[in-house]
Amino acid sequence: MKKLIVEAEVSLDGIMNHPELWGEIFKYHSDDVSKYLEDLLFIPEALVMGRITYEGFNAHWPAQKGKVADRINSMPKFVASKTLEEPLDWNAKLIKGNVIEEIRKLKEGSGKGLLQYGVGSLTRTLLDANLVDEIQLMVFPFVFGKGESWFDKIELSHFKLVDQRSFSSGVVLLRYQPIQQTDQ
């Protein structure tokens, strides 16, 4: 079965969704952070996205050039949304019907896996269905103090720390595996 990784970049206070946040986060994208994120992007065969991430990425990435932009622009994208309609732009396909069953089908068989950027209601749905194999939080060394926290999107969940790494800019990567309901 293919692995589904969720990756999110957050401030120390867990903020991940505010228009001004990215200006602060990019200050800490040192060469080693950028290299790690680039390497991560080349692991999966496709991206899984909720509507908000899809719309934000679609507004930014198609106009970009370079190795990372070429990769992200060419990858298949599967978008979970109750409001978007097909056809979608940017090499994306709308997940129709039961999102849990459709993601389960995407994970079947061998392959390089799937990557979801950001944490939202889709992540919560996938965690509840035991479809997330790993959550990677890149924690940035500043407190933002406003906006939506990744904790606001997740109900009671337990995780096992599988790896941690520090970067030259002070960013810390925390890699967790969800502890499945039956494992507790």
Image: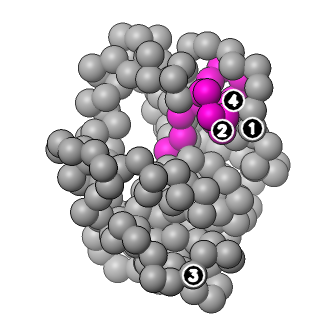
Decide which of tag 1 and tag 4 comes sooner along the chain. Answer: 4
Q: Residue at x 66, y 38 (%)?
A: 17
**Residue 127 on the magenta segment:** no
What's the coloring here? one colour
Mark sitting on residue 17: 2
CA separation in Å, label 4 and label 3 = 32 Å
Q: Nearer the viewer, mark 4 or mark 3?
A: 3
Which amino acid, mark 1? Answer: Glu
- Callout 4: helix, strand or loop? loop
User: How many residues crowd mark 2 within 10 Å: few (<14), some (14–19), many (20+)?
Assistant: some
Mark sitting on residue 14: 4
Q: Nearer the viewer, mark 3 or mark 1?
A: 3
Which residue is denoted by mark 1 in the rendering?
148
Which amino acid, mark 4? Answer: Gly
Q: Residue at x 30, y 50 (%)?
A: 63
Which residue is denoted by mark 3 in the rendering?
85
Q: Which residues are magenta?
A: 4-21
Q: Quadrant of the N terminus?
A: bottom left
Decide which of tag 3 and tag 2 comes sooner along the chain. Answer: 2
The image shows residue 54, relative to residue 86, as above or below, that is above
Q: Residue at x 51, y 60 (%)?
A: 54
Dots 2 and 4: beta carbons under 8 Å? no
Q: Quadrant of the C terminus?
A: bottom right
Residue 69 drawn at (x, y percent): 26, 47
